[in-house]
Image (cartoon, rainbow, N blue to C red):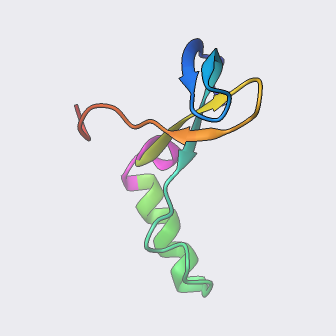
Amino acid sequence: MSTFSTSCFCNKCQIDTKHSEVLVRKPSRYDTDQSILGRIKLLMHSFINGGHYYDMDRYVQCKVCGQKTLDNKGSEFE
């Protein structure tokens, strides 16, 4: 979790409140395979693609009510 904090409009509170940034890894297509071979594929996929820094979703979370909102900006690999 990042320490980024900014003031944004919250749809639930209906006012400008402080928000924090939360980064969540998108699930890989190899996450569902629980076999040994599936775990090895997931490890190799994570190693080759940069692990947990690759394919992330950015959420902003209201510090007053706790509501998370998906806030991906820009295009991938920008």
Residue 19, given in percent of the width and then of the height, sits at 63, 21
Task: Give the left or right position of residue 24, taking residue 29 as reference.
Answer: right
* Direction front: furthest residue: 14
Q: Residue at x 54, y 18 (%)?
A: 8
Quadrant in which residue 33 is drawn: bottom right
* Direction bottom: furthest residue: 35
Question: Looking at the image, how many numbered discs can be counted on the residues?
Answer: 0
Depth check: 53 or 1 in front? 1
Depth check: 13 or 47 in front? 13
The magenta stretch spans residue 57: no
Q: Residue at x 57, y 12 (%)?
A: 6
Residue 4, given in percent of the width and then of the height, sits at 59, 16
Task: Give the left or right position of residue 26, taking residue 13 as reference.
Answer: left
Q: Residue at x 64, y 23 (%)?
A: 20
Question: In what quadrant of the picture does the C terminus appear?
Answer: top left
Above or below: residue 49 compared with residue 4: below
Above or below: residue 15 compared with residue 53: above
Above or below: residue 14 compared with residue 18: below
Question: In what quadrant of the picture does the N terminus appear?
Answer: top right
Task: Give the left or right position of residue 12, taking residue 59 as reference.
Answer: right
Depth check: 77 or 67 in front? 67
Residue numbers of the magenta segment = 48-54
Task: Give the left or right position of residue 44, taking residue 74 as reference.
Answer: right
The magenta stretch spans residue 52: yes
Quadrant in which residue 2 is drawn: top right
Residue 70, given in percent of the width and then of the height, sits at 49, 42
Residue 12, given in percent of the width and then of the height, sits at 65, 35
